[in-house]
Amino acid sequence: MADKEGIKVEKNYYVDKPFKVDGNFHVKGASNLDWGMKKHLTNIFSPKSGNTVMFAFDHGYFMGSVSGLERLDILIPQLIDHVDVLMATRGALRSCVTPNFRKGIALRVSSGSSMLNDDLSHELVSVDIEDSIRMNADCLAVQTFIGADGQLSSIGNLSKVINAGNKFSIPTLGVIAVGKNMERTSQYFKLATRIVAELGAHIIKTYYCDDFDEVVAACPVPIVVAGGKKLSEKEALTMAYKSIQGGARGLDMGRNIFQSYHPAAMADAIGKIVHNKFTDNEAWEFFCEKTKK
Ligand code: 5RP
């Protein structure tokens, strides 16, 4: 077993050097994948900008009815034209979203916890690969708890989903969960994102942190940033801007969109940062212009 303490070489992330692998595909780390994988990844990441706006509304899988998500049948039609991907459970998609849209699907396939648990880190794979194929999923989202009590089972779940997805060319999205005893530091996110990428996840969802460019540089697949708890719109746009500046290939945002008083305008403003190189100030002005009465 490798010695945990014996590595003395100073770390160099070469943050100024772009990721390089032979091949010309627009998604990081995906040049050597097969046609089907690349097609699904193209349904998520724009070939033009290389980036994505994912709208996460899978919170109900452990939080039940969250503020802002009470009526998916009313919310989703307002937002669907303003985002690239819907991240959701199969229950929400089948019951509340008519499949007459041309957007990517990130299907939540792990579950097992609820807000009533003290430790949320024990999950299982709750959607099999056959049903994911029936849902036309473009990627399979698995919660991964590195360093938490449920680490072993969560790595087991992730591996099971990656193995099944690889058989049918469906990418896996590893969602880095931050347990209550963990800190949102670059040290933690470098460890967790790299482990999940090395296990074979094709996309990683994590949080923005200091030295985020090093987290991105050390991760060989695209990182999309979670929104986290509700911030002011201006703060959320700044976080999105810093994430893209730091090398994220998109946002996978929930509460900062659906808990805004103007969810569609917020999604559009995020899209301007993600796809159109807007700064946070430009996106804020855009948001104010769109929402002024
Ligand atoms: C839960 C998830 C959620 O989809 C996501 O984190 C929620 O998005 P937000 O934090 O932006 O509300 O992955 O683990």
Image: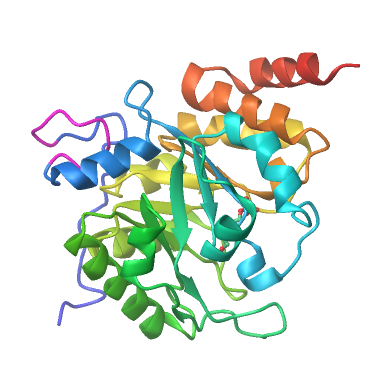
Could you tell me how many numbered marks the image carries?
0
Give the vertical position of 121 relative to 138 (above or below).
below
Q: Is residue 192 left or right of residue 91?
A: left
Which residue is found at the position 16% from the left and 77% from the top?
A: 2
- Magenta span main SS: loop
Examine the rendering and report whether any part of residue 266 can be seen: yes
Q: Is residue 184 left or right of residue 250?
A: right
Which residue is found at the position 37% from the left and 62% from the top?
A: 132
Instruction: Point out residue 194 in the picture as x, y percentages from the top left corner.
Output: 31, 59
Examine the rendering and report whether any part of residue 209 can be seen: no
Q: Is residue 27 magenta?
A: yes
Instruction: Point out residue 59 in the picture as x, y percentages from the top left corner.
Output: 64, 62
Depth check: give the residue in front, 272 or 21. 272
Ligand 1 lies in quarter: bottom right
Which residue is found at the position 45% from the left and 48% from the top?
A: 105
Which residue is found at the position 38% from the left and 67% from the top?
A: 131
Instruction: Point out residue 166 in the picture as x, y percentages from the top left corner.
Output: 20, 61
Instruction: Point out residue 8 in the picture as x, y percentages from the top left corner.
Output: 21, 62
Pick the quarter of the image with the N terminus.
Answer: bottom left
Depth check: give the residue in front, 67 or 215. 67
Pick the quarter of the image with the C terminus.
Answer: top right
Q: Is residue 190 magenta?
A: no
Q: How is the image coloured?
A: rainbow
Depth check: give the residue in front, 127 or 216. 127
The answer to which quarter of the image holds residue 292 is top right
Question: Which residue reaches farthest left?
Answer: 22
Q: Is residue 132 left or right of residue 122?
A: left
Q: Which residues are magenta?
A: 21-31
Depth check: give the residue in front, 239 or 265. 265
